[in-house]
Image (cartoon, rainbow, N blue to C red):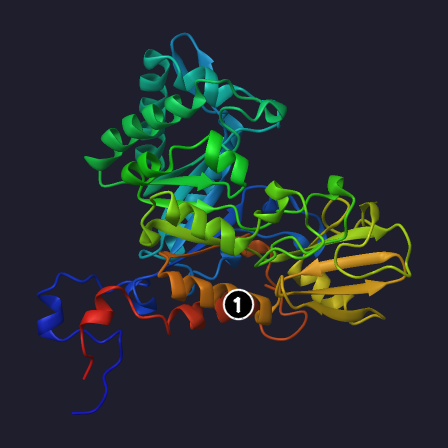
């Protein structure tokens, strides 16, 4: 008997209660696509709606997102305008696919926000928040929620209070209790900064409660560092001497979550489909780690220094010199005093190899609307397609124990 497709399901496998869905056809791994709620209002060719989402590639789409609800007369209420946008989005995405799982992110907007802190430390408010989330999911036919509480606890610069570390677990536990009976999923957006992992999270407790942790393994090098660098290096480079910064990379981030007690199958690796540009202090010094004076020039669609892949793939055709950070395993390009680090299929392949090596639960794309969805530089959605195809070659956990013949 010849080799059978991994998406073929014989009777013996059916007895194992495997579901035939997109995740199963990708070795049981999730390909989660973030959809930016702002993308329908992006100007010109950057406008992106639910009609453009490649539902044939994404196992899940997370609508990112709705703002934190307002506390009003003893209950939490979401903004009506945001809900109307969510309603329109869900109508379209559900009409296009009955198999894609749809979730929503609850965002805390602004670095100094305390909304999650103030809610989670008071049991009555936690209960009201859980009720608001359950009502939201039921009303709009959503399959899950992602909690994006990025800087709990000791990160004073970004808000938060000292009790956040415990309050976070209480919040996730209460949410899990409400979601489980409704067969809904709980995601937690988790940072990989060493200080946050040590001081703000109880990793083992988080991973016992949530279904998945979507890892913040992109956009890890802010312009404020005044150093030209790729935004998601795989490993530490020699010029990074600060201990916290040196450990803020993809490999160390993933390994720390695992070492601190999170099952790899619950970790979803974040991949950013964008480039980050810097303005060099001296154009003659352009290696990774060169001094920079701030963000790069503003592109057509987003604020200074950030370029979605559909824009940068065209930009790089016009007089840029291309290089590769062999340790960080990401490309960068230089033109005059402009320095641009970005993801391509080679750098993404390195991240996919890590996901396979560590047997992670899948990947999440920041954002699917940043891919070349128009096909400006060739085929449509080239990075998302590459990731989908690479995921399909990763065996599922159960696949390691079954001989497919």
In this view, 118 is above or below 361: above
Residue 371: x percent and y percent? Answer: 59, 61
Residue in the picture at 39% in, 66% down: 356
Residue 217 visible? The answer is: yes
Horizontally, residue 14 falls left or right of residue 393, namely left
Horizontally, residue 325 falls left or right of residue 66, namely right
Residue in the picture at 27% in, 40% down: 184
Residue 87 visible? The answer is: no
Q: Residues within 10 Å of mark 1 (few under 14, many from 20)?
A: some
Image quarter for residue 96? Answer: bottom left
In this view, 373 is above or below 204: below
The secondary structure type at the circle numbered 1 is helix
Nearest to the observer: residue 128 or residue 232:
232
Nearest to the observer: residue 325 or residue 129:
325
Work out which residue is located at the far bottom of the displayed protein and give it: 1
Residue 84: x percent and y percent? Answer: 48, 33
Nearest to the observer: residue 128 or residue 272:
272
For the N terminus, the image quarter is bottom left
Residue in the picture at 60% in, 26% down: 158
Q: Give the residue pinned by disc 1.
A: 350
For the C terminus, the image quarter is bottom left
Horizontally, residue 243 falls left or right of residue 131, namely right
Residue 171: x percent and y percent? Answer: 35, 25
Residue in the picture at 58% in, 71% down: 346
Total count of labels: 1
Image quarter for residue 5? Answer: bottom left
Residue 24: x percent and y percent? Answer: 28, 65
Horizontally, residue 132 falls left or right of residue 390, namely left
In this view, 10 is above or below 126: below
Nearest to the observer: residue 213 or residue 77:
213
């Amino acid at each position: 008997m010849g080799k059978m497709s991994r998406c073929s399901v014989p009777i013996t496998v059916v007895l194992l209660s495997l579901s035939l869905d997109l995740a199963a056809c990708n070795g049981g791994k999730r390909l989660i696509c973030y959809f930016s709620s702002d993308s329908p209002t992006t100007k010109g060719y950057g406008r992106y709606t639910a009609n453009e989402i490649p539902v044939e590639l994404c196992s899940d789409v997370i609508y990112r997102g709705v703002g934190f609800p307002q506390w009003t007369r003893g209950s939490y209420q979401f903004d009506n305008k945001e809900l109307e946008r969510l309603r329109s989005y869900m109508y379209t995405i559900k009409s296009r696919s009955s198999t894609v799982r749809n979730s929503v992110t609850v965002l805390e907007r602004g670095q100094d926000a305390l909304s999650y802190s103030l809610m989670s430390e008071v049991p009555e408010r936690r209960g009201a928040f859980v009720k608001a989330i359950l009502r939201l999911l039921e009303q709009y036919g959503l399959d899950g929620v992602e909690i994006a509480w990025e800087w709990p606890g000791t990160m004073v610069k970004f808000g938060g209070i000292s009790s956040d570390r415990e309050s976070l677990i209480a919040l996730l536990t209460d949410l899990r209790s409400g979601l489980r009976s409704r067969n809904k999923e709980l995601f937690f957006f988790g940072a990989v900064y060493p200080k946050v992992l040590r001081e703000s999270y109880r990793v083992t407790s988080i991973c016992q409660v949530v279904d998945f942790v979507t890892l913040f393994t992109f956009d890890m090098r802010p312009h404020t560092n005044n150093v030209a660098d790729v935004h998601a290096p795989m490993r530490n480079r020699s010029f990074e001497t600060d201990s916290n910064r040196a450990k803020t990379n993809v490999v160390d981030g993933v390994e720390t979550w695992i070492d601190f007690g999170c099952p790899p199958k619950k970790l979803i690796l974040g991949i950013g489909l964008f480039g980050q540009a810097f303005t060099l202090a001296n154009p003659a010094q352009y290696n990774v780690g060169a001094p920079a004076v701030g963000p790069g020039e503003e592109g057509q669609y987003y604020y200074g220094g950030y370029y979605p892949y559909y824009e940068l793939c065209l930009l790089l055709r016009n007089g840029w010199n291309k290089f590769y950070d062999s340790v960080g395993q990401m490309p960068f390009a230089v033109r005059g005093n402009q320095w641009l680090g970005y993801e391509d299929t080679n750098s993404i392949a390195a991240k996919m190899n890590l996901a396979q090596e560590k047997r992670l639960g899948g990947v999440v794309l920041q954002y699917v609307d940043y891919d070349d969805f128009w096909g400006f530089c060739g085929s449509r959605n080239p990075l998302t397609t590459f990731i989908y195809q690479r995921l399909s070659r990763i065996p599922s956990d159960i696949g390691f124990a079954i001989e497919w013949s």
